[in-house]
Image (spheres, coloured by chain):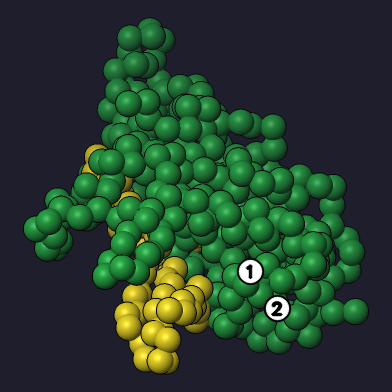
Chain colours: A yellow, B green
Amino acid sequence: MKRIAIDPITRLEGHGKITIFVNDDGTVENAYLQIPELRGFEKFVEGLPVEEIPRVVTRICGV
Amino acid sequence: MKLKIGIYWGAACGGCDVAILDTHEKILEIAEAADIFFWPIAMDFKYDDVRAMPDGHLDAVFYSGAIRNSENEEIALLLRGKAKAMIALGACAHIGGIPGLSNMFTREDTLRRAYIESESTDNPGGVLPSERTVNDGNELELPRFYNTVKTLSQVVDVDYTIPGCPPASMQIYSAIGLIADGMLPKKGSVIGAGDRALCDECARTKSEKKITKIYRTHEKLPDFETCLLEQGFICLGPATRSGCGSRCIKSGVPCRGCYGPLDGITDQGLKMLSALASVIDGKEEQEINATLDTVAAPLTTLHRFSLASSIPRRKKV
Ligand code: SF4
Ligand code: SF4
């Protein structure tokens, strides 16, 4: 079995990689899209003053 | 000879990359001065292309984003080896930025919230990302998610820093000009920003500050003439490097310090705390403390962008 890695995927905001497993006869057995990143906004906005949230979550994506 | 440059992001939002593009027609001048050999947001080069480069192949690498996981660190190390000049671009790489706020929590808290507890998550098996997974006999890897977010200079040797969240586009343009003209200042310098405090370039009128009450921004409307700190709003101007063009202040929004501290200051938040203590009206310690106690979320307000580079770096748990 052959393994093809497309790392990183490009021309988008964020991180991603694709791993493709190819059988000996050349057919694709499995393909995976993985998102190797997390910053943790889901958690770290907790405890911030609510009026500050707009200027924090704008940093989720700046594209 | 054309410069060879690389641009990369760790734990970032892409805003720094967009700030490069926001040089508008000047991007054509950048393209004339420099060939880009790596830039995931805009061009299709792979990590293997970078691995194949000889050491020192790139004149400059602009690294935005904090170090949140082992991949961010691994690629920072890889690029460091390929770069003559390693440049921290933007607040996340410089001082940890907004992603650094994650240092208020543990790795486990964050993973649990993001992948199990959050209202939009459907994960009945409670599966969390792991560094190695076997699915259908296929082995897959993910980077290690760190407990503590780090700045770029905490993992590699950084030659220059362009601060800001995001950095002002024209300052990135001037920085590239400095590299192209071989005019870079001494190693370790902050480039593309001022060397005074933001208050020094802020156009608001300042008199002797005597704050008796701290206001949150929803509690009253600021006026557009007077210093925001004098009006009782926490404004990080006294502890922040100038160079942003006071964009927030001009919009009536107090500074949160994205340009980081001035030279020689190790902890921007503590610098702000001492500035704050000196402008609060009151003779007795008790009186001053009572006013200081009304600052909402003091740690993450005074270290909004700089928690990962502060003295404690993270909340101890
Ligand atoms: S410094 Fe600001 S603009 Fe740049 S990647 Fe970080 S959050 Fe985005
Ligand atoms: S504290 Fe803020 S509003 Fe006041 S002078 Fe400094 S930057 Fe301007």
Q: Position of residue A33 (x, y in %)?
A: 35, 75
Q: Residue furthest bottom?
A: A26
Q: Is residue A9 left or right of residue B113?
A: right
**What residue lies at 28% left-to-right and 28% top-to-bottom?**
B294
Q: Position of residue A27 (x, y in %)?
A: 37, 91
Q: Chain of mark 2?
A: B
Q: Chain of mark 1?
A: B
Which residue does the numbered mark 2 point to in the structure image?
B36
**Is disc 1 in contact with disc 2, using a CB cutoff of under 8 Å?**
yes
Q: CA distance from mark 1 to mark 2?
A: 8 Å
- N-terminal-most mark, 1 or 2: 1
Q: Residue furthest front?
A: A24
Crowd class of label 1 (few under 14; some 14 to 19; many from 20; radius 10 Å):
many
**What residue lies at 46% left-to-right and 22% top-to-bottom?**
B277
Q: Position of residue A51 (x, y in %)?
A: 26, 50
Q: Amino acid at mark 2?
A: Ile
Asked whether residue B7 is in view, the answer is yes
Q: Is residue B256 left or right of residue B132?
A: right
Locate the C terminus of chain B by quadrant. Answer: top left
- In this rendered view, identify the residue nearer to me: B121 or B302: B121
Asked whether residue B257 is in view, the answer is no
**What residue lies at 26% left-to-right and 70% top-to-bottom?**
B136
**What residue lies at 70% left-to-right and 78% top-to-bottom?**
B36
